Image: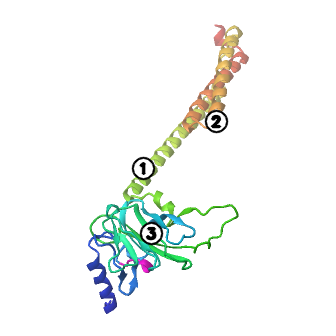
Amino acid sequence: MRLTVPRIIMALACVALLAIPAFGSSGGPPVSNGADPTVEFGCTCHGGGTPSVAVIVSISGVPQAYTVGDTYNFTISLQHQSNSEGGFLMTDFGVGSFTPLDEQGTREAEDNPDGISQSKPGNDWLVPWTAPSSDVGAIYFSLVGNAVNGDGTFDEGDHWNILTFSIAAPDGAMVSEGEELSLRTISVGDYDELFKQEVDPEAVKAAEQKELADNFFAQGNLYYWTTLSILLIAAVFQGEFYQKKFAGGPDNLDMRLAVPQAIRRGILFAALSYFFFWTLETSKPWGWNLLVGMLALWAGYGLYRTYAQAKAPLKVEQML
């Protein structure tokens, strides 16, 4: 792609006027990017050249309406998830006047007496602004803030945003009867962006692999123990079938032995059954349900065997 002359001039202007990233140069941000004023269009050298809602640009201490000749202390702040410092450029288009403060790291914007900027990278700048000496109607402001990553270059790691607002003329603010004009805080940006977490693709992949392995292990255990339980139950039924077919049924158990045995096994069956339903009610892991359920079936089968033996006829071999 061929570079046009205006594009080359604009790129060289950004490089020459910015010593460190995103409005972080000691001389402040450039007044313009080519033919576009920075306070209106931002700086296309940073953050992909477009404003980012990830940067919260805010200014506090702003009156709803100004009083002629009064001075107001604005505080300009930048917020970003990872970039904690940067720079700014603000103008009132020459209507009032800003007071640069060395101790606050602010200075008159380079080649722009109508604006104010930072003299070094920072944050939370105090900027006094004096209203005009006469009523000039509503006053409009433009504020550009850039949060930089501090890597020493102006790149996509720097993010900027632009805020425009106005202050009404004296007696020009709409307030309810008895309500006083108060100072306000104005901001632009998306606060939700401050709490977003960067996703590590490797961590996501590792988590997916772990989840897959856990599912495989859990499903494998479920199928194994379920199959074993089915085989055990089938073996019991098979034993009952062959005993009745080839051995004539179970051996007789004297009632003096059968009654106390039935009581013991009945109590055990009732307790395990109650425990089984408790595991279901409390949503215990499937392993608990399977184990307690199998024990309850075992106790129930023992109770059945006691009953079957007590009812079985006495065999000849048992009389000898």
Q: On the image, which quarter does residue 168 sit in?
A: bottom right
Q: Which sits in the foreground, 11 or 303?
A: 11
- Tell me if label 1 and label 2 are in contact, CB under 8 Å: no
Label 2 packing within 10 angstroms: few (<14), some (14-19), many (20+): few
Question: How many other residues sit within 10 Å of disc 1, few (<14), some (14-19) or many (≥20)?
Answer: few
**Horizontal side of residue 12 vs 40, given as left or right:** left
Which is in the foreground here, disc 3 or disc 1?
Answer: 3
Is residue 271 at all visible to an observer of this figure? yes
Q: Quadrant of the N terminus?
A: bottom left
Q: Earlier in the sequence, mark 3 or mark 2?
A: 3
Judged by depth in the image, the label closer to the viewer, 3 or 2, is 3
Q: Residues within 10 Å of mark 3 (few under 14, many from 20)?
A: some
Q: Position of residue 292 (x, y in %)?
A: 59, 30
Q: Which residue position holds label 1?
A: 210
| Badge 3 element | strand
Residue segment shown in magenta: 39-44
Query: Where does the image place residue 182, in percent across and percent down from the top left?
Result: 58, 62
Q: What's the mark number on residue 129?
A: 3
Quadrant of residue 314 within the rendered picture:
top right
Residue type for callout 1: Lys
- Are circles 3 and 1 on residues that touch, CB within 8 Å? no
Percent x, y of residue 256: 70, 7
Taking the spot 30% from the left edge, 64% from the top edge, the residue there is: 150
Verify whether residue 40 appears in magenta.
Answer: yes
Q: CA distance from mark 3 to mark 2?
A: 71 Å
Q: Secondary structure at mark 1?
A: helix
How are the colours assigned in the image? rainbow
How far is mark 3 from mark 1, CA to CA? 59 Å
> Residue tagged by mark 2?
280
Frontmost residue, 152 versus 1: 152
Element under disc 2? helix
CB under 8 Å between callouts 3 and 2? no
